Amino acid sequence: MNHLWAPWRLTYITGPRSDGCFFCDAGRGADDREARIVGRSTTGFLILNRFPYNSGHVMAVPYRHVTRLDALAAEEAQGVWHLVDVAVRAVERAMSPQGFNIGINVGIAAGAGFEHLHVHVVPRWVGDTNYMPVLSDTKVLPEHLDQTYDRLAAAVAGVFDLSSS
């Protein structure tokens, strides 16, 4: 039997559950590293996915709790797309992917139980899918979230001005 080490999953399994919205709680929090927020703007933030599809998987999230695209004010919609652009550029600089999957989660069925609208930015590399997910329903991530956080937070902070979005 093969064992894969994923120590961050224990926090998810045994950790406390918030009665509120995970994204709202993260956006209001003071400790960006603990929340895995790699960048903030005036209308939203970029947050690492704690259970990523690939290393570098980040989400653009508006601060305001909305569940539909048409509920975003024009400034918020523009701000979310600016965050997506910042995420793509920062991940390109920090991790050199060969492509991206970008998708919007709208509604509780689309967002792993989160109704708060968010946009996924998932870096992709040629050959990043192998036999593990197909044969053993297992995804191997080559980098710990702490290392990914450090790389992306530095790329966002060092290159991009988020204050205008």
Image (cartoon, rainbow, N blue to C red):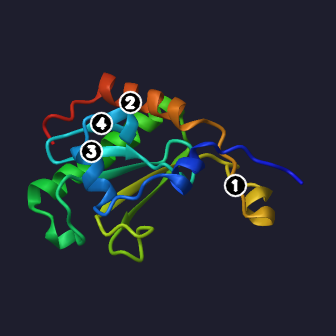
Tag shown at residue 45: 3
- Label 3 residue SS: strand
Q: Is residue 85 left or right of residue 96?
A: left
The span from disc 3 to disc 2 (Cα, nearest Å) is 12 Å
Tag shown at residue 153: 2
| Front of the two marks 4 and 1 | 4
To which quarter of the image does residue 162 belong?
Answer: top left
- Label 1 residue SS: loop
The residue type indicated by label 2 comes to Ala
The mark nearer the N terminus, 3 or 2, is 3
Q: State the residue at coordinates (15%, 55%).
A: 76
Residue extending furthest toward the top: 158
Name the spot of residue 147 as percent of width and height, x first. 53, 29
Name the spot of residue 158 as percent of width and height, x first. 32, 22
Residue 22's place in the image compared with 90, above or below, is below
The mark nearer the N terminus, 2 or 4, is 4
To which quarter of the image does residue 7 belong?
Answer: top right
Residue named by callout 4: 39
- Label 4 residue SS: strand
| Front of the two marks 1 and 2 | 2
The span from disc 2 to disc 4 (Cα, nearest Å) is 6 Å
The residue type indicated by label 3 comes to Phe
Decide: marks 4, 3 in contact (CB < 8 A)? Answer: yes
Residue named by callout 1: 129
Tag shown at residue 85: none
The span from disc 1 to disc 3 (Cα, nearest Å) is 28 Å
Decide: marks 4, 1 in contact (CB < 8 A)? Answer: no
Name the spot of residue 125 as percent of width and height, x first. 61, 46
Q: Residues within 10 Å of mark 3 (few under 14, many from 20)?
A: many
Residue 159's place in the image compared with 20, above or below, is above
The residue type indicated by label 1 comes to Thr
